Image (tube, coloured by chain):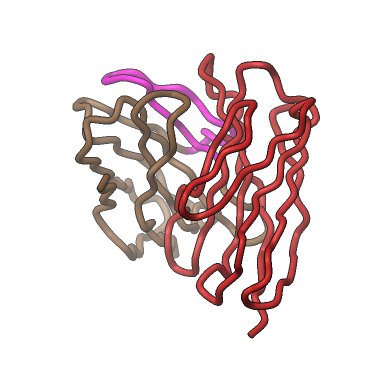
Amino acid sequence: DVKVTQSSRYLVKRTGEKVFLECVQDMDHENMFWYRQDPGLGLRLIYFSYDVKMKEKGDIPEGYSVSREKKERFSLILESASTNQTSMYLCASSFIRTSPLHFGNGTRLTVT
Amino acid sequence: DAKTTQPNSMESNEEEPVHLPCNHSTISGTDYIHWYRQLPSQGPEYVIHGLTSNVNNRMASLAIAEDRKSSTLILHRATLRDAAVYYCIRIDQTGANNLFFGTGTRLTVIP
């Protein structure tokens, strides 16, 4: 079974801090994705990557950046965390562009 | 517009079939239809996907309209464990201007 592991289940950070959310997949998947999930808004795509060192903006990239130095790892970076970035963050991966997405269990980030 | 449209909520009695609809009227010829579900405190879980033909697997069936502008996820016998939020999304091999999950349909299963 594919495993997508997010480094933290819960995270509390202060406004202005630099925050790293890490995601690792163990199935040699080409594609990786970062979503955030908020009540009433569903899942919204932040960034995605179809290859190592490659990144594309999703629907809501503002305030975020990403890094993919190795195929199995996709990091989401909040350069200066703000309270409106308090959310559930979900990482996903897929083998090819049209194959199923496999999600991690999420990181609930609170910015105070 | 890469969005799909689903009802906000549906109810079903336990052990009865459930038909969850999804509208994707602007779908292109290369878009696959995927369905996922999300249980409380978990990430979404893949259920089924298809392109043009109806599909079956151990979890569910997917019926795709002939014009591909809508699809229906069919749970043949709902159980309490099927209570979840169900998402229908489009995935296109030419790019990620879709992958839009929206708010899905919250399915309540009544014992």
A56 magenta-colored: yes
**Seen in the image, is B98 located left or right of residue A61?**
right
| The magenta stretch spans residue B69 | no
The percent coordinates of residue A101 (x first, y second) are: 43, 39
Q: Position of residue A61 (x, y in %)?
A: 52, 33
User: Residue placed farthest to the bottom in the image?
Assistant: B111
**A40 or B63, nearer to the observer:** B63
Q: Is residue A78 above or below residue A85?
A: above
The answer to which quarter of the image holds residue A105 is bottom left
**At which x and y percent is residue A99?**
43, 30
Task: Decide if residue B79 is on the left or right side of residue A97.
Answer: right
The rendered magenta stretch, by its main secondary structure, is classed as loop
Residue A42, how many percent across, how many down?
62, 52
In the picture, the quarter occupied by the C terminus of chain A is bottom left
Does residue A26 lie above or below B98 as drawn? below
Q: Residue at x 39, y 48 (%)?
A: A103
Q: Compared to A1, does B108 lie above or below?
A: below
Marker count (numbered): 0
Residue appearing at x 64%, y 75% in the figure: B109
B20 horizontally vs A27: left or right = right
The chain in red? B
Q: In the depicted view, which residue is nearer to us: A14 or B88?
A: B88
Report the front residue among A93 and A15: A93
Rendered hue of chain A is brown
Instruction: Provide the residue span drawn in magenta.
Output: A45-63
Q: Residue at x 70, y 19 (%)?
A: B28
**In the depicted structure, whether residue B39 falls above or below residue A7:** below
Residue at image point 76% right, 44% down: B5
Left-right relation of B51 to A24: right
